[in-house]
Image (spheres, grey):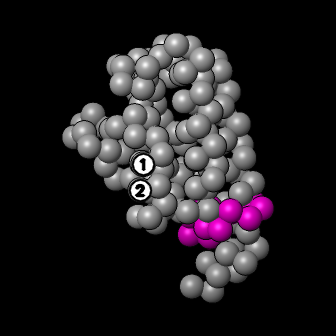
Amino acid sequence: MTPEKTQQLFDAFPYLYRGRVKPIEESLMSFGFECDSGWFDLICMLSQKIEDVARAAGFEPQSDEWPEAIQVKQKCGSLRFYLKNSPLAISDEVAALKREAEECSAKTCEVCGNPGTLVEVRRVKTLCEDHTKELIQS
């Protein structure tokens, strides 16, 4: 993800992404979002939904109970969003939100955000037709 998009997410959700300033033994968010910018909107929506669930559960953003993302990446062509273990992080509601985002990412081009499909060219990624051709030609 571009540095600008990364910063936008960090600014919009400072407590969810508070691991960005922690040692890598505690959180891998210091590496940023390990995917391309096409999933920016998807990650933004998921982040907002997770924070909405936390608020509805009565958690305060500055509290230890507030969810904390410890890694966000692409794996096997779809989004993986890992939260630090907490009651909210392992709740059925948050698990369903993460699963929904993962399924959506497998149909969304990781590069541009347009509809895409899983392709395997040197690695597995979800790409639109144009970015698949670009990858094949490179």
SS of the residue under disc 1: helix
- Residue at the image point whose x is 55% and y is 21% from the top: 55
Determine the main secondary structure of the stretch shown in magenta.
loop
Q: Residue at x 60, y 23 (%)?
A: 53
State how far apart marks 2 and 1 are (Cα). 6 Å
Residue 126 shows in this picture: yes
Q: What residue sits 67% from the left and 75% below the top?
A: 131
Q: Is residue 119 above or below residue 85?
A: below
The answer to whether the residues at label 2 and label 1 have Cβ atoms under 8 Å apart is yes
Q: Which residues are magenta?
A: 109-124
Of the numbered discs in the image, which one, if any, rests on residue 7?
2
Q: As displayed, is residue 99 above or below residue 132?
A: above
Task: Give the SS element for disc 2.
Answer: helix
Q: Position of residue 35 (x, y in %)?
A: 51, 57
Image coords of residue 40 (percent x, y): 58, 55
Q: Position of residue 133 (x, y in %)?
A: 70, 80
For label 1, count other residues whose C-alpha is less than 10 Å away and answer few (under 14), some (14-19) or many (20+). Answer: few
Q: Is 49 above or below relative to 85?
A: below
Lateral position of residue 133 relative to residue 11, left or right: right
128 up-or-down from 84: above or below: below
The residue under label 1 is 11
